[in-house]
Image (tube, rainbow, N blue to C red):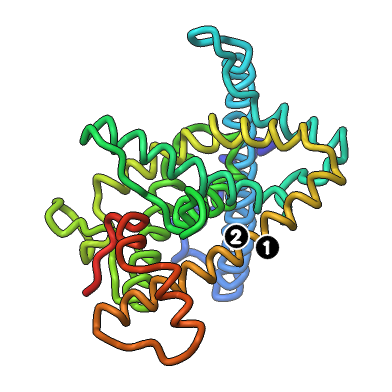
Amino acid sequence: MINEEKLNDRLTLYYEALAQEDTLTEKEKVKLYKDIDREIKRLNKLADSYKEAHKHLVEASDELSTRLRDTERSNKKHFGIKNAPANGTIDFKEEQQMHFARGINFYKLFLIFFTGSFVGVLIELIWCYLRNGYLESRSGLVYGPFNLVYGIGALVLTLALYKYRNRSWTFSFLGGFITGSVVEYFCSYFQELLFGSTSWDYSNIPFNLNGRICLLYSVFWGLLGILWIKKIYPRIASWILAIPDKAGKIAVWVLCVFIVFNSAVSGLAVYRWAERINNKEPSNQLEVILDNRFPNERLEKIYANLSFK
C-alpha cells in the first residue's frame, strides 16, 4: 500500500524545488531532474501494478457474483422443469470424474458440433412452421436432419465463450454478437465461392454487410450467445457427463465417420446439381451415380432455400 502522506510530502518537496529552480546550481539541477525522473518511473510502475490489481479484483468479483447467481438459478424450476446446472458445477463434476469429455477437448467439441447440427435444424423447422404454417427442410446434408452451419456455430460459440462461462452475461452477449456474425459471414462467402450458391440474403434488411450479415441477426447472435453458454451448453455438458467413457469414445468416432462421409456426399451432390443446371453432362461413373441418387427434385426438397448465382 502507498503511504499517501509520505508521497504527498515528497511530491511537495519536488514541486517546491522546481518552482525555485533558478536558485539552484547546474549540478543541483541535474541531480534534481534525475531524482524526479526516478520518482516518475516509480510512480508509473506503481500505477501499472495497481491497474493490474484493480483489473484482477473486478474480474474476481464479477466471476464470484456470477457463480453465485448461476448456482441460485440452477436450484429453481420453471413450469416444473429444473434450470440448467451452473457451469461451475459442471466444471467440478468433470474434474472429479476425470471424464473423457472434460474441459474443452476433441470429444466434447465434436459432440457439441453434432448436437448443434441436429438441434439447429429442428428449431428452425419449428420456427418455419410457426411463422409460415408449413414444414420445410432446413437440412444442409443429404442424409438426416443435419446442418453443419448450426454445428459450426455451436462449436465456435463454445470455443469463444468457454473462457467466459462463469462471467456475467455482458461477455456472453458480446462474444456471441462478434463470433456469430463472423461465422455467418464466412459460411455465406465460402458457400458462394465454392458452389456459386447462397442460402440467405439480408440485402433488404437495414445495416447489412454485403447481404451476408446484418445488425438485427447479429443482435440475435448476441442473445444466442447468452442462451448458449448459460442455458444450452451446461445442459449438453451434463448429458455428456452421463455417457460412459469407453462407449462415449467409440460413439464419437462412429459419428465422426458418418458426418465426414455425409458431408463429402452432400458436397459432391450439390456440385453436380450446379453442373446439371448449367447443362453439363456427367463425365464419369461417380457423376452418373450422383445424378441417379440425387436428382434435382430430391435436392430441391432437401435444400429448399438454396439458390445458384
Residue 220 x, y percent position in the rendering: 33, 41
Which residue is denoted by mark 2 in the rendering?
Answer: 259
Q: Secondary structure at mark 1?
A: helix
Residue 83 x, y percent position in the rendering: 57, 18
Which residue is denoted by mark 1 in the rendering?
Answer: 257
- Residue at 29% across / 55% down in the picture? 304
Is residue 294 shown above or below 114?
A: below
- Residue at 36% across / 41% down in the picture? 124
Pointer 2 with pointer 1, Cβ within 8 A? yes
- Residue at 55% across / 69% down in the picture? 29
Q: Kindly give the residue lying farthest to the top in the view shown.
A: 80
Q: Gap in Å between the C-alphas at discs 2 and 1?
A: 6 Å
Q: Quadrant of residue 300?
A: bottom left
Q: Quadrant of the N terminus?
A: top right
Residue 114 x, y percent position in the rendering: 59, 50
Q: Kindly give the residue lying farthest to the bottom in the view shown.
A: 283
Q: Amino acid at mark 2?
A: Ile
Q: Quadrant of residue 71?
A: top right
Is residue 241 shown above or below 155?
A: above
